[in-house]
Amino acid sequence: MKLSYQRLHPNAIEPQRMSEHASGYDLFACLDQACILAPGQREAIATGIALAIPEGYEAQIRPRSGLALKCGLGVLNSPGTIDADYRGEIKVILVNLGSQDVIIEPGMRIAQMVFHKIEVFNLQECDSLKETLRNAGGFGHTGT
């Protein structure tokens, strides 16, 4: 499949799969200068890229595991969703969950993007739902 993208800034870097079997495409910070995220701080980081995601698909923005482990850097609304009809710049809401400042450098790999096929349902209101063993059992209902 092909997916069209647009470079919105001359320094934008094309999303890239970093290995042959990678499911995600790394996204790169498109910044004019470094950005410092203090512990607990969040910031929408530009990528300089817009996408034309095909109808019936979405892109999910997820943290990079190495940055999460080493720096406590996460994607605040993980996974972030990019809908097929959105044509604006992809921005990643990063949050510093660590105990020290994190420096986001221009061109730094900041997140990964994974594409998923979506299903659309016709919702139908009803008076009751089919029962299951779990029924309304919620958090911790199975023991832990």
Image (tube, rainbow, N blue to C red):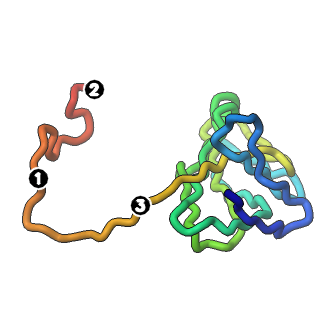
Q: Position of residue 126 (x, y in %)?
A: 12, 68
Q: Position of residue 88 (x, y in %)?
A: 68, 72
Marks 1 & 2, CB-CB < 8 Å contact: no
Instruction: Tell me the CA gap for discs 3 and 2.
Output: 31 Å
Tag 3 residue: 119
Classify 10 Å Cα crowding around label 3: few (below 14), some (14-19), many (20 and above).
few
Residue at 51%, 56% (x, y): give it: 117
Query: Which mark is in front, 3 or 2?
Result: 3
Residue 59, given in percent of the width and then of the height, sits at 59, 57
Disc 3 is placed on an element classified as loop
Q: CA distance from mark 1 to mark 3?
A: 21 Å
**Label 2 sits on what residue type?**
Thr
**Quadrant of the snapshot with the C terminus:** top left
Is residue 99 something that shows in the picture?
no
The residue identified by callout 1 is 130
- The residue singled out by tag 2 in the image is 144
Quadrant of residue 66 within the rendered picture? top right
